[in-house]
Amino acid sequence: MQESFATTKVRPIRKVFIINENDFCTFNMIVKHLMGEIDGIYNLIFESSPIIFESNITEFVNRFDPDIVINYSTLDDIALAKNFKTEVHSAHVSDFNLFRYGSPLYTFTGMPYLLRKYPDLLPTKVYSSSNISTEPNDLFFGLNYGIMNKKDYVRLKRSQSIFKDILIECAHKKVNIEDTIFDDQRKFCFITNQIGSGHSTSGSVYAINHNLPNLFEKDNFCFISKANDLNNILFFWNERVAFNHSKTAWLPIELLDAEINIIKDNTTLICTNETDAQTLETKYSNNKIIIIKEYYFNVESERWSDFEHDQNIIFDKGKVVVRHPNEKTFSDTGFGGCYVLEIKGNNTFNYPKNYFFDELLRAKNIDKKMFPTYFTRFSNKGISRYVQHFSPFDTSGITDAFNIPDFSSTLRFHFSKIGYTLKETPKTFILGQVINLLKGLNNCKLLCDRKIYNFINKITPHNRTESIIKSHLPELLNSPHKDTIASYLGKLNDIGDVVIPSKILTIENILPEISDNEIKNKESKKEDAILKVQQLYNNKILLRGKNFTCEHCTASLWFALEDFSRINYCNECGNSINIPITTSNKSTGDHFKINHLVSRAVDQGQLATLLLIHYLYSQSTSIPYIANYEIYDDSKLLSDIDVCVKLGNKLGLCECKSKQSFSEKQIDELVFIANKINCDFILLSCLLSKNDDGISRNIDYIKKKSINIPVFIITDEELFSPTPKRLYSYFEVNHRTNKFHSGPILI
C-alpha cells in the first residue's frame, strides 16, 4: 500500500452536444433543458457540419475538456469519439435520458464558502424568458436572459435551494433591455456564474493563444444574424462559454430597428458572413464589425474551487478509495443529482486522455450495459468520474472507489486499443535487476558518473569484445551497426558459446580510472576515489575477493570473500587449496571484478538505457516508464521500444544508442508508433557529440518528416551534465511564433 496526497472536487458534468445542421427543434429542446441545470449554459453545442473535425473546433473542445459528447446528429459516434478523444453517448438509443447528465437548480442547497463571505455575489433579482422558439423575439429573450418555465419556477420556490429567494421576473414584460443586456448579474441564465468562479488566467505557457485579437475582454460584443442562422447563434453560445465574464449578447437582424438602443458606439458587432456584415456597415458605420469564421479562446477558468477537498489517499493493489465531505457538495441535504467527482494531485492520475479509458478505469462492479451513463476518464487535470449524489438526509458525503492501474498496465491497454500487443524482453529484467542492485533510480547517479560509466564499460566483456573484433574482424569497425554486433557477441558470451572472463583488478588498478581530475588535492582526490570504490562494492557492482594461482594445476582462481570456507577447492582440478597470504613476497590485497549481471547489462546496451532513464529521472522524481518492450501486430514483430516514459502528462517514446547515430528505419518506426498512440514527444539518446556527422544527418532527415511534436536528440554532453536542461520547457508555447516547438531539438 502507498499513501499519497490528492484533491477531490465535485462539479457539474461538462457536455458537448452535436446536432444536425439547422436543427432548431433539437437546439431549442437542449437549451430549455440546460437552463434548468446547475451551470447549464456552460456546455457546448455544435452542428454536424464538416468543420466540426477541423483543428480549430477540435482544439476548442479539448481546451473545454468535456466529460462526454452527446450525439443527437447522424454523425458516427466512433468518429466523434476519436476526434474529441472523449466518450460519446448517443441520444438515439431507447433508454437515453438527458436528466441523467446533470442536476437541477432546485437541488443546489449547499452554500459555497465564497458566497458565505460575499453574499452580494448572489443577485437579488434576475430576468428570464418563459419559452424559446424560432420566432426572433423569443430567441432574443431566451438566449440572452435564460428560460424558466412555470413548473421549474414552482419547484425552485418550494425547495431549500440557495436561489429560492431570488426574484425572477419576466423579461418580455418588465426588463429594461438597454440597461440589462450586457449585465450578467441581471440574467437568470448566469445565476451560478459569480459563485462558481474559482480563478481564471489570461492563458497558459502550455497552451496556444487562439485569441490574439483580444476579443471579448473589455468592450460590449453583440452577435448579430438572422433568426434562422443557427451557425451564428452557436458561435455566440459557445464563445459565451469560453469567455463567461465577457459582455456578450445576441441580436437577430429582424429586431435591429426595435432594439436599436442596445448598440452603442463602443459595441463591437460580430457576424459570420459578408452579407450580414454589409447590412451592419450600412446601419452602424461607426462601429467595429468583425466577421468570425473560427472560434477564439485562450482563458483557462477553474470553476467550483470552493468544492475542493484535500485528503490523503491509499493506493492498494491498483485500487483507490476517496471520500468527499458533504459540506463541499451542491446538495448538503443529499437530494442531489448527477455530477463529476474530479480527483487530481498525484502523477498516477495523469495520462493523455482518450475515449476508451473508461473500460480500464471503471470499477468492476459497474456494468456499462446496465449503467450506460457512468464514466471514468483521464481529463486535462486528473481523473473524472460520474457520480450520483442522491442519499436523502445522509450527511456522510460521497465515497467512491475506482481502479488506478500502473503505467505499464495503462500503456499495454492503450496499445491493445489500437490493435497492438506489448511484450517484455530479457533486457527488461536485466535492467530492472541492475536498478534493484542500486536500490532504486535515486542511487543510479553512481553509475551515471562519466568516469565510472567509462570504467564499467572498459572492464566488461563489451570492451573486450571490441578488442576481439579489432584483432580478427577489422572490416566491422566501420559498420554502422557496431552496437548491434557487440550486442550479439555479448549474447554469445552470455550463453557460453564465447567465453570472455571478467577482468580482475586491484584497488591500485581502479583508482586512476575513476579519480576526479577536478579535485586538485591528491589526498582528497584519492579519498573521493576510494569512496566511489566502496559504493560500487556496497551496491554489488564490483565484487570483492581474492585472486591467486592454484598450487596444484596453476589455474588462475578468484574467490568472492563471502564464498570462502574453512576448506576450499580449486574449481578446475578439484583439489583442496590454501589461500596464500603473500605473492612474490608481497601481501595479497583484495581483488575486484565486475558483477556478471552488470556486465550482461553492458553487453546488452542497458547501461546506455540506464543513463537515459537517470537523465529523465533528474527532470522529475516521478517518471513512470517501461523499458525494452517489443510491439507486435498479431504475431508479427512490428518494432521495439527502448523506453516509453511519461513526463507530467506528456507521453514519449525513446530510442537509446551507445556509439552510433540512428538509422532512417529506426526514426521511421518511432514516428509511426508515436502517431499511432498520439505521443507528445520522441527522444533519441546517444553517446555522440553534438557535432557528430551522424547526428547532423539525423537532424536533416527528421526535418524532412514534418513532425509536429518535439524530437529531442540528447547527446553525450547533456547526458553527463551535472545541470541538465529542463525538457518540459520545450512543451511551452513559443511566445514569438505562438506555436509549439516541433521537429528536431538538439540538446
Image (spheres, helix red, strand yellow):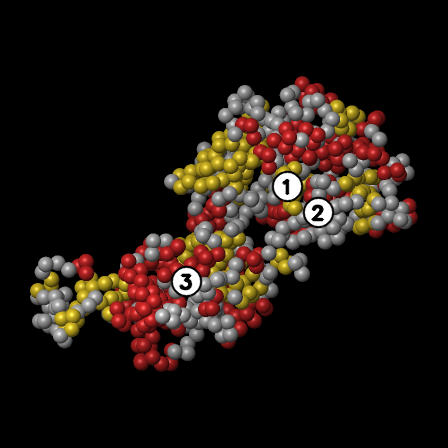
Q: Are marks 2 and 3 in contact (CB under 8 Å)?
A: no
Query: Residue 49 — which label?
Result: 2
Mark 3 and mark 1 residues within 8 Å of each other at the beta carbon: no
Query: Which label number is shown at residue 199?
Result: 1
Which disc is residue 184 wearing?
none
Inspect the image, locate mark 2, and give the three-letter code of the amino acid beneath it. Answer: Ser
Q: Nearer the viewer, residue 424 or 383?
A: 383
* Spatial separation of the CA atoms under disc 2 and disc 1: 34 Å
Q: Residue at horizontal 49%, vertical 74%? A: 692
Q: Is residue 329 visible?
A: yes
Looking at the image, residue 349 sits to the left or right of residue 112; the answer is left
Q: Quadrant of residue 255?
A: top right
**Which residue: 90% across, 49% down?**
285
Q: Nearer the viewer, residue 116 or 21?
A: 116
Residue 417 visible (yes or no): no
**Residue 165 position within the rendered picture, expressed as x and y whole percent measured from the top left:** 70, 22
Observer-side mark, 2 or 3, equals 3
Quadrant placement of the N terminus = top left
- Label 3 sits on residue: 611
Disc 3 element: helix
The picture places residue 707, in percent across and down from the top left corner, at: 58, 62
Residue flagged by tag 3: what amino acid is it?
A: Leu
Look at the numbered disc 2 and give the secondary structure of its residue. Answer: loop
Q: Is residue 608 left or right of residue 378?
A: left
Q: Amino acid at mark 1?
A: His
**Element class at badge 1:** strand
